[in-house]
Amino acid sequence: MAHRIIRNIPRADPEVVKALGQQGVSTVHEAQGGTGLMRTYMRPIYPGARVAGSAVTVFCSGDNLMIHAAIEVCRPGDVLVVVSASETTDGMFGDLLGSSCRARGVVGLVIDAGVRDVTELTEMAFPVWAKAICAHGTLKATGGSVNVEVACAGVTVQPGDVVVADQDGVVVVRRQEAAEVARLSQVRADRESVIRERLRAGELSVDVFNLRGKLAERGVEYLDETAE
């Protein structure tokens, strides 16, 4: 495969990206029909981390040379989405790259590999979701591509797709569908707000969610006698 760096990509409207980030991973995932969720091993490196941004995708061939190259084409508000041709947990990204990302306005990293210098990255509050934490670094020796379609933790990511990440994981929203998913996420959030107030007021979830009929259909019986 030819190695290439695509400098310019379409991105979602910043207000749409912001709206998706405010809703969070679980709401966005459910609003778009339960799709786009990366595998559960993708975890944030520190509690409370959250981010939403446009994906700049990076395909590496086993080391981090292309991450260095990718930062040049990033714009403020972007999230780096990094994958490796060979499965690895080596620390491909550390605090020096984090500092470079910060200077370019990159708001976070999603990497289906390892990350290192977690203490320093946490101190600078640079949000990262990774497969592993590993002090063993990598070389800068082999070519790859930037802003091409990649498969990251089980999800296909196109350059410019919206990445939303928080404590619940990482979800990807197609750029072309981002505005509609943001609208559906708000509808879902509004509905859940009403439900939450009903539950707080003491209503039972079996009534709020109309589950009594389903219990009856499944043959569940209510009995008054105490089991001996």
Image (cartoon, helix red, strand yellow):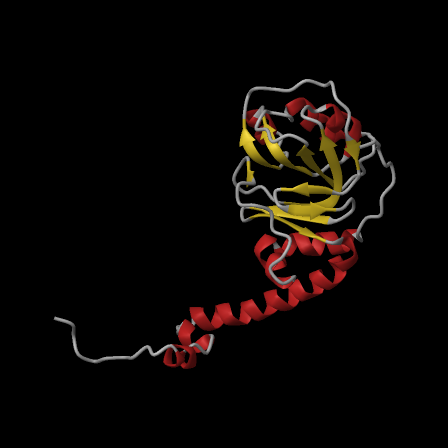
Res 135 seen here? yes
The x, y position of residue 55, in whole percent, is 74, 43
Along the horizontal axis of the image, is 146 left or right of 83? right
The x, y position of residue 8, in whole percent, is 87, 40
Residue at position x 41%, y 74% in the image: 206
What is the tally of numbered marks visible in this picture?
Answer: 0
The x, y position of residue 209, in whole percent, is 47, 75
Residue found farthest to the front: 1
Position above or below: 66 against 141:
below
Along the horizontal axis of the image, is 147 left or right of 136? right
Position above or below: 140 against 163:
above
Residue found farthest to the right: 8
Position above or below: 195 against 75:
below
Q: Quadrant where the N terminus lies? A: top right
Along the horizontal axis of the image, is 168 left or right of 218? right
Question: Closer to the camera, 108 or 194?
Answer: 108
Position above or below: 158 against 120:
below
Along the horizontal axis of the image, is 179 left or right of 209? right
Residue at position x 73%, y 52% in the image: 17
Residue found farthest to the left: 228
The x, y position of residue 137, in whole percent, is 61, 19
Q: Quadrant of residue 33?
A: bottom right
Res 125 seen here? no
Q: Quadrant of residue 109?
A: top right
Residue at position x 16%, y 72% in the image: 227
Q: Quadrant where the C terminus lies? A: bottom left
Residue at position x 74%, y 54% in the image: 174
Q: Quadrant of residue 128?
A: top right
Question: Closer to the camera, 183 or 223?
Answer: 223
